[in-house]
Image: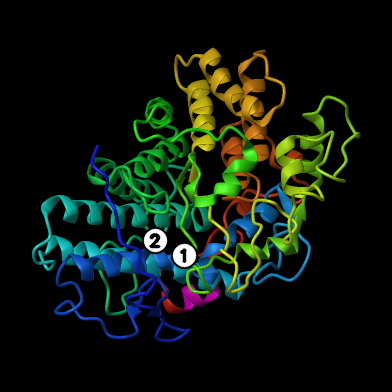
């Protein structure tokens, strides 16, 4: 199978900025006045633009939001100072949270950059590039656009209701002027995400470094999107294809090896690489301002068989080994969480963002198989127990469908805590699928309005066609 090597260039080709705080933040323009006449000329210049798209996903206002989501759900708490954290512990986020404004606009910067590259490549501006290479670059840009829209929809839209009009604003053309547009429906946003990922699955590169988004990453993300859309048969089928991939992705033998090997881990499907200096680093070192929740601690304690016997001294004992790895004295590292060991210094490697890894796909397969019509609960259980066996905890036994679904949700929490906010989105999905009562998981979840974050006030001030989310 052909190897595809992509040159890493840490120079961000263009930074994108808002023209003013009161403008429409959905639409952004390059602050160095890039023109369509001179930016993409050949393969090398197109690669620079693509590198810029990747780099935007690691910027400060985008890269460490999983820590906020961990506090908004039941994974942990924000215990120290961190930007934009007001109300996340108690699910009472104010509409004037300036960090949400930066988060929102930061995602649209990525989309606008991806739109630019897609536009230029499709127009034939890259002279001398092969059709194969052009298709691969477009596929990566479409993956980035799809991934970004998926996040925007989960943060600011009613992603759990396929009939809702409360989606997010879709923009699929490069913008150099400010234009007010209303929110698209949830179904329309999912359709755009699907279209981009189907293209990326077909045309994306294979056998590439894990910090790029190739064909397999597109399939993995699409299986997750199908799960959210309640297309359970499609989700299970595609997850199975990803698990049985031909590119050498496999579960690490030891859980700790994932974080030791970071973006080079055999099970990491998409995890942006951090730079050798402050440029290109993520802000996940701010995990040092968080701590685990009592829910996570109790769940981890229950895995060891005897309740209330856990200890975090030394390498930890009496807890789920994944919890002990993150928080025990020996392995928690300087930031207090072994998943993110690197401090924010020029000399350090910087921390990886674990957007997609194979363990999650096993659990997507397990849930989708359980939920689909005619699904095989034994197969679902096998996928769940693959993850438990790797963790070194006792296998689950099959009792009934409801118990299996809850076991899968808890397993995702134990496996993925503080990685991508999946514990929070699982709560929302399970509540809306009738499997859970929100307040039983977290006492401060008292209204469905809390399932969606507020559209920031500055966004609405700049785009008066955008309707605020319910309850804000």
Residue drawn at x 82%, y 45% as measured from the top left: 294
Residue drawn at x 64%, y 70% as measured from the top left: 84
Element marked by disc 2: loop
Residue 263 in the figure: left or right of residue 399 = left
Q: Which label lies toward us, 1 or 2?
A: 2
Residue 227 in the figure: left or right of residue 439 = left
Instruction: Name the residue that disc number 1 marks.
Output: 467
Of labels 1 and 2, earlier in sequence is 2
Assign the magenta stretch its main secondary structure. Answer: helix
**Residue 183 has which mark?**
2
Q: 78 or 58, which lies in front?
A: 58
The local crowd at label 2, few if under 14, some if 14 to 19, many if 20 or more residues have their Cα within 10 Å, is: some
Element marked by disc 1: loop
Question: Quick check: marks 1 and 2 in contact, CB under 8 Å?
Answer: yes
Query: Was residue 459 drawn as part of the magenta stretch in this picture?
Result: yes
Residue 328 in the figure: left or right of residue 19 = right
Which residue of the protein is positioned furthest toward the front in this rendering?
Answer: 347
Q: 376 or 362, which lies in front?
A: 362
| Residue 314 against residue 372 in the figure, above or below | below
Residue 179 occupies which quadrant of the picture?
A: bottom left
Residue drawn at x 60%, y 42% as measured from the top left: 257
The local crowd at label 1, few if under 14, some if 14 to 19, many if 20 or more residues have their Cα within 10 Å, is: some
């Amino acid at each position: 199978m052909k190897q595809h090597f992509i040159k890493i260039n840490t120079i961000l080709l263009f930074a994108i900025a808002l023209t003013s705080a009161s403008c429409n933040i959905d639409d952004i323009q390059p602050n160095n006045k890039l023109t369509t006449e001179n930016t993409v000329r050949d393969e090398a210049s197109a690669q620079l633009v693509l590198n810029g798209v990747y780099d935007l996903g690691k910027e400060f206002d985008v890269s460490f939001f999983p820590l906020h989501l961990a506090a908004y759900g039941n994974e942990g708490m924000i215990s120290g100072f961190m930007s934009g954290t007001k109300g996340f512990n108690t699910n009472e986020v104010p509409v004037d949270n300036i960090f949400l404004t930066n988060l929102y606009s930061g995602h649209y910067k990525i989309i606008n950059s991806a739109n630019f590259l897609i536009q230029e490549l499709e127009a034939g501006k890259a002279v001398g590039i092969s059709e194969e290479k052009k298709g691969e670059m477009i596929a990566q840009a479409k993956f980035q656009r799809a991934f970004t829209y998926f996040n925007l929809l989960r943060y600011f839209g009613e992603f759990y209701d396929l009939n809702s009009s409360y989606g997010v604003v879709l923009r699929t053309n490069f913008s150099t002027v400010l234009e007010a547009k209303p929110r698209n429906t949830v179904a329309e946003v999912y359709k755009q995400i699907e279209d981009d990922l189907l293209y990326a699955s077909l045309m994306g590169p294979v056998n590439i470094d894990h910090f790029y988004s190739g064909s397999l990453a597109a399939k993995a993300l699409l299986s997750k999107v199908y799960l959210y859309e309640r297309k359970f048969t499609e989700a299970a089928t595609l997850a199975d294809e990803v698990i049985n991939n031909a590119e050498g992705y496999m579960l690490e033998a030891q859980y700790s090896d994932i974080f030791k090997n970071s973006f080079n881990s055999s099970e990491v499907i998409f995890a942006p690489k951090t730079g050798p200096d402050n440029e290109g680093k993520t802000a996940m070192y701010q995990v040092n301002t968080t701590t685990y929740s009592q829910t996570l601690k109790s769940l981890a304690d229950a895995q060891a068989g005897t309740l209330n016997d856990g200890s975090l001294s030394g390498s930890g004992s009496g807890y789920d080994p994944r919890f002990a790895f993150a928080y025990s004295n020996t392995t928690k590292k300087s930031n207090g969480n072994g998943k993110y060991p690197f401090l924010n210094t020029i000399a350090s490697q910087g921390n990886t963002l674990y957007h997609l890894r194979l363990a999650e796909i096993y659990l997507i397969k397990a849930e989708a198989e359980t939920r689909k019509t005619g699904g095989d609960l034994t197969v679902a259980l096998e996928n769940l127990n693959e993850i438990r066996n790797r963790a070194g905890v006792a296998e689950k036994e099959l009792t009934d469908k409801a118990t299996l679904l809850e076991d899968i949700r808890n397993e995702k929490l134990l496996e993925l805590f503080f990685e991508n906010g999946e514990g929070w989105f699982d709560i929302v999905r399970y509540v809306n699928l009738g499997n859970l009562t929100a307040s039983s998981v977290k006492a401060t979840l008292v209204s469905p309005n809390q399932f969606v974050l507020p559209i920031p006030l500055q966004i609405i001030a700049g785009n008066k066609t955008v309707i605020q989310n319910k309850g804000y």
